[in-house]
């Protein structure tokens, strides 16, 4: 099996459930998932609405660890997703 096929299959595995995707992150971050992260099913629905065509650019303000952007890139590969964590915003505001 080629590495491209393996990578694709691995990617499909990570996005098959929220639990699989959460395991990409350290345990300390996983503990925040239920409270702070958008479920994949919701992200997929929202991304269909936000990116109805190729070339759309989406900015996630308050992106945290980037789960929404990762899901967006997976479900809508022809759109561009950008994440801006709150910590970065705070830094910009306090200059």
Image (tube, rainbow, N blue to C red):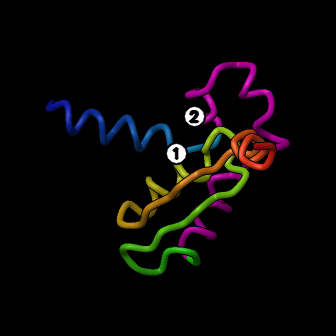
Find the magenta span and give its range: 19-48
Residue named by callout 1: 16
Residue named by callout 2: 20
Q: Is residue 55 left or right of residue 41?
A: left
Q: Is residue 77 left or right of residue 92?
A: left
User: Is-magenta flag for residue 79?
Assistant: no
Circles 1 and 2 in contact, beta carbons < 8 Å? yes
Residue 38 percent location from the top left of the image: 72, 52
Image height check: is 40 above or below 15? below
Query: At 78% across and 49% down in the image, what residue appears?
Result: 93
Name the residue furthest front.
Answer: 95
Q: Secondary structure at mark 2?
A: helix
Viewer-nearest residue: 37 or 55: 55
Residue 11 percent location from the top left of the image: 40, 40
Query: At 85% across and 42% down in the image, what residue appears?
Result: 35
Q: Quadrant of the C terminus?
A: top right
Image height check: is 77 above or below 34? below
Q: CA distance from mark 1 to mark 2?
A: 7 Å
Viewer-nearest residue: 9 or 56: 56
Alpha-carbon neighbours of circle 1 within 10 Å: few (<14), some, or many (≥20)?
few
Residue 8 percent location from the top left of the image: 30, 42
Name the residue furthest top.
Answer: 27
Which quadrant would residue 18 be assigned to in this image? top right
Residue 23 percent location from the top left of the image: 60, 27
Name the residue furthest left.
Answer: 2
Viewer-nearest residue: 80 or 22: 80
Q: Secondary structure at mark 1?
A: loop
Image height check: is 86 above or below 52? above
Q: Quadrant of the N terminus?
A: top left
User: Is-magenta flag for residue 36?
Assistant: yes
Checking the image for residue 58, the label placed there is none
Query: At 73% across and 51% down in the image, what residue appears?
Result: 62
């Amino acid at each position: 099996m080629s590495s491209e096929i393996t990578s694709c299959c691995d990617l499909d595995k990570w996005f098959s459930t929220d639990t699989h995707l959460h395991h990409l992150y350290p345990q300390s971050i996983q503990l925040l998932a239920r409270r702070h992260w958008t479920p994949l099913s919701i992200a997929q629905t929202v991304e269909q609405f936000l990116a109805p065509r190729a070339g759309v650019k989406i900015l996630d303000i308050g992106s945290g660890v980037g789960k929404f952007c990762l899901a967006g890139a997976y479900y809508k590969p022809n759109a561009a997703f950008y994440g801006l964590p709150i910590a970065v915003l705070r830094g910009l505001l306090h200059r």
